[in-house]
């Protein structure tokens, strides 16, 4: 897959169950003909920065960072996270809180969640939200609960656990996106260096698809890898997480997947949130 067949591809993805489920077979050499991987685990806010600095061969990143990295990296048509009914949530202490002028905690300002939030706010908070505070993901719900911020934007397993903090769902960013576009929600992307070359990129995509299918065919094989890195997540929550974020779009973006990615980034560019995409920016390989 690289110029030296004995050299491993340096890849960075999150310890979240969907990523470890997807990459288990490939990372452990169970995909015939697949490349050897040198895996680094990092949350997506870190991998976004790694991509902007060009530090790895392959990365899982937020779709929101694509406009900043597509000169060097190609979007792979598989391995990422899109879906329906799996969008980020805005949480508050009190039901029905008006966010006009309020402080909102977000995990990153270069995330798909943030773009979806800003598009939602532009349509539903006419007076505009107030200060945006960036906090580590695990600190957001406690900050809302304790009154340090007025609302929080949360992702992933928080969909299943926010009630434990006594919080209320003010809005589902995914519901707003789906109802206004009819498209799936683009969350996380797999990108790889264009300098690997077309043959290697195509082979990598094929290997990732094979890894996904292997996990679907025998989920129990991936379970130890998933739970080892799931950060003390309850196994049933890990299963829910995989069920939401690993789906047909993980195996292949397809026409709807590409339309969702371009639709999100085009709308975000129109709001001045990201640079505009070139006409061939999403082409593969």
Image (cartoon, grey):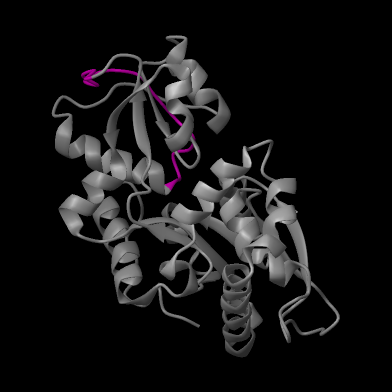
Residue interval drawn in magenta: 96-111
Residue displayed at 80% across by 73% down: 8
Query: In which quadrant of the rendered view does residue 264 lie?
Result: bottom left
Q: Main secondary structure of the magenta part?
A: loop
Residue displayed at 26% across by 18% down: 95
Relative to 142, residue 13 above or below: below
On whether residue 110 falls in the magenta region, the answer is: yes
Is residue 40 left or right of 267 when viewed as pictured?
right
The answer to whether residue 272 is seen in the rendering is: no
Quarter of the N terminus within the rendering: bottom right
The front one of 156 and 7 is 156
Question: Residue 97, how many percent across, how many down?
Answer: 24, 18
The front one of 251 and 57 is 251
Residue displayed at 42% across by 24% down: 163
The answer to whether residue 5 is seen in the rendering is: yes
On whether residue 101 falls in the magenta region, the answer is: yes
Relative to 8, residue 168 above or below: above
Question: Residue 220, how many percent across, how many down?
Answer: 67, 61
Is residue 188 left or right of 124 when viewed as pictured?
right
């Amino acid at each position: 897959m690289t110029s030296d067949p004995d050299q491993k591809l340096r890849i960075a993805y999150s310890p979240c169950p969907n990523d470890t489920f997807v990459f288990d077979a490939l990372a452990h050499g169970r995909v015939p003909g697949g490349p050897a991987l040198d895996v680094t685990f990092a949350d997506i806010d870190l991998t976004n920065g790694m991509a902007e600095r060009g530090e790895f061969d392959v990365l899982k990143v937020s779709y929101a960072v694509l406009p900043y990295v597509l000169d060097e990296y190609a979007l792979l048509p598989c391995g990422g996270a899109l879906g329906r009914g799996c969008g980020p949530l805005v949480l508050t202490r009190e039901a029905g809180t008006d966010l006009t002028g309020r402080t909102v905690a977000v995990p990153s300002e270069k995330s798909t969640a943030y773009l979806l939030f800003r598009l939602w706010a532009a349509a539903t908070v006419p007076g505009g939200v107030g200060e945006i505070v960036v906090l580590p993901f695990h600190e957001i719900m406690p900050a809302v609960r304790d009154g340090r911020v007025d609302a929080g934007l949360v992702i992933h397993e928080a969909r299943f656990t926010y009630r434990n903090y006594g919080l209320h769902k003010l809005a589902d960013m995914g519901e707003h996106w789906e109802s206004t576009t009819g498209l799936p929600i683009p969350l996380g992307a797999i990108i790889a260096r264009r300098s690997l070359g077309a043959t290697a990129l195509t082979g990598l995509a094929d290997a990732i698809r094979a890894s996904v299918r292997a996990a679907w065919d025998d989920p129990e094989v991936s379970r130890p890898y998933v739970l080892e890195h799931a950060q003390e997540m309850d196994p049933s929550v890990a299963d829910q997480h995989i069920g939401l974020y690993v789906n047909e779009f993980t195996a292949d973006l397809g026409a709807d997947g590409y339309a969702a990615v371009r639709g999100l980034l085009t709308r975000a560019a129109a709001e001045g949130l990201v640079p505009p995409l070139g006409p061939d920016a999403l082409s593969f390989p």
